[in-house]
Amino acid sequence: MSTPMTTYSFRLYVVGQTPRSASAASNLRGLCDTYLPGCHEIEVIDAATRPDLAEEERILATPTVIRVAPLPKFRVIGDLSDQGRVARFLGLPGVNAASPDGPER
Amino acid sequence: MGEPHDAEPARPANLGHDARRIVMSALADGIVAVDDSGVIRICNPAAEELVGRPTGELIGTLFGYPVVAGESTEIDLMLPGGQTRVVEMRATTTTVAGQLLHVAALRDVTLRRQAEQELEAELERRGSVIAVAAHEVRNPLTGIGQLVDMLRDPRESFTDEERADVLGRIADRTAHIQSLVKKLLTVAKIDAEVSHTTTVPVPVLEVILERLAEFADRPRNVNVSCDPGVRALADRGELSEMLVNYLENAFAYGAPPFQIDVAEQPGGVEIRVCDNGPGVPAEFEASLFDRFTRGARARRGTEGSGLGLWIVRHLARANGGDAYFEPGETGACFCLRLPQAPRR
C-alpha cells in the first residue's frame, strides 16, 4: 500500500454517547490508522446535540460516516467493524475497488 | 461513484414490477435498497413506517452503503422531529434486473424489546418459570456470546494467560446456566406436581460431604459439625438439592468462614448453614423464601435466580419439615428442619 499524500477527512454522525457511538468511532479510528496512517481527520458529530448538522446532510440513520474529502463523497452506515468492506465503500487507497459483494463496478 | 450531492433527485430505478415484488417478499422487515451510489431506489411500507417518512420522500434520497460485519448490527434511525428509533440492520447485496442493489433489512428493536418486556412482565405476574428462564438465562448467555466473539476477533491477540482467563469466565457462566437449568427443572416438576418424595433414613453427614465435594473446584473455608450417626427421614435426592441451594446461597451472598451445624432437636434434625457475610437486610427477611422476588435480587445486586430458597422451603415442607432463616450476630443462618430417623 503506497502512503497517500492527500489528507482524508471523515465526518461520523452518531446519536448520543452510547456504546454504539463509541464503538463506531473506535472502529473508524482503527480503520483510518490501518489504511490512512497519519493522513486523516475525523470529526464526530452527535446528531442529538447538533440536529442541524445531521439535517444538513440529510442523515437518515446513525452511525453514518461520510468521506468528505477528497471528493467524491461516500457514505457508509453501520458499526464500521468490517474494516475491509467499509474501506472499499469509502474508496480508500490501496483497497480493491471492486464491490465486495457484487460484480465490478 | 460519488455522492450525488447536488444531483437532481434520482428517479426510481427502472426495475420490473416482479423484481420489486421479489425483493419485497424476500424480506419481511422494513427494507431499504440503495443503488451503486448509495441512493435509495426501493423501500417497502415497513421501512416507510420505521423511518417515519413517505416512500416518495425516501426514493432518490442518499442513504449510504449498509455494511454489517456479522449477522446484524444496531443503528439509530433519525425520525422527523429529532426522535430516533433503534433498529437491527442486516445487509445483503443483490442484483435486480442487472442493477446491483445493497439492501438494508431493518427490524424495530425497540418495539420487539417492548413486546418481550411486556411478555416477561405478564409471565412474571403469573409466577411462570418461563419468565425466570428468559430473564436469567439471557444475561450469562449474552456474556458467553461476547466472550466468544472476543476470542474469535481476528484483530485481537491474546496471551495464553488471557485466553485462559476468558475461557474461565465462559466456564463460570456456563456453570451458572447449568445450575439454573437444574433449578428450573425442579420448579417445573413442583409446578406440575410430578415430584414424588420418597422418604428414607438418610445419613446427613454423608450427604453434606457429597455436596461439598461438588464445590471442590473452588476451595471454601467450610467447617462441618455433625454426628455421623444422625439420620434424617427424607428423600435423599431432595435433601441433596436443598443443601446445594443453601450452599450456593451462602457462597454467593455470604463470606467465609462457613459453618454447617447438624443437631438433633425435639422437633427433628436441624441443619444450619451459616456464613459471616453482611447478613440479610431486615426488610428482606420476610420475602427471603418467596419465589422469584425480583426486587430482592436487585437489592442484593447479584445473579441469583430468586428460586433457590423457594425450592428449599418447598422441598423441606414436602419432606415433612421446614426451611427458615435466623439472623446471626454476624452473617446469616439458613436452617432446615427434617423429621428424624432412628440413629444408626
Image: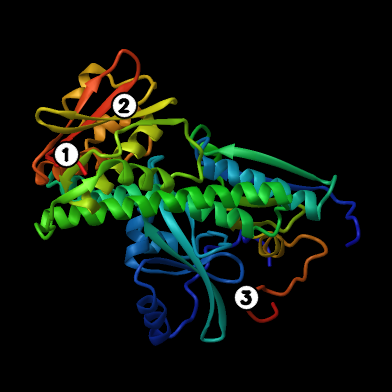
Colouring method of the image? rainbow
Q: Residues within 10 Å of mark 2 (few under 14, many from 20)?
A: few
According to the picture, the residue beneath numbered tag 3 turns out to be A101
| Left or right, B340 with reference to B80 | left
Q: Quadrant of residue B340?
A: top left
According to the picture, the residue beneath numbered tag 2 turns out to be B299
Q: Residues within 10 Å of mark 1 (few under 14, many from 20)?
A: many
Residue type at mark 3: give it: Asp
Same chain for the residues at labels 2 and 3, yes or no? no
According to the picture, the residue beneath numbered tag 1 turns out to be B313
Q: Position of residue B26 (x, y in %)?
A: 39, 78
Residue drawn where x is 62% and y is 46% of the image: B165
Residue type at mark 1: give it: Arg
| Left or right, B54 with reference to A31 | left
Residue B138's tag is none
Q: Position of residue B133 (x, y in %)?
A: 28, 52
Q: Position of residue B81 (x, y in %)?
A: 38, 41
Viewer can see residue B116: no
The quadrant of the picture occupied by the N terminus of chain B is: bottom right
Of residues A27 and B220, which is closer to you in this image?
Answer: B220
User: Are the two marked residues, 2 and 3, in contact with CB atoms closer than 8 angstroms?
Assistant: no
Please identify, in this view, whether the residue under mark 2 or under mark 3 is nearer the observer.
Answer: 2
Instruction: Read off the chain for label 2.
Output: B
The quadrant of the picture occupied by the C terminus of chain B is: top left
Residue drawn where x is 41% and y is 54% of the image: B87
Structural distance between the alpha carbons of marks 1 and 2: 21 Å
From what the image shows, is residue A96 above or below residue B289? below
Residue drawn where x is 56% and y is 71% of the image: B35
Structural distance between the alpha carbons of marks 1 and 3: 60 Å
Please identify, in this view, whether the residue under mark 1 or under mark 3 is nearer the observer.
Answer: 1
Q: Secondary structure at mark 2?
A: helix
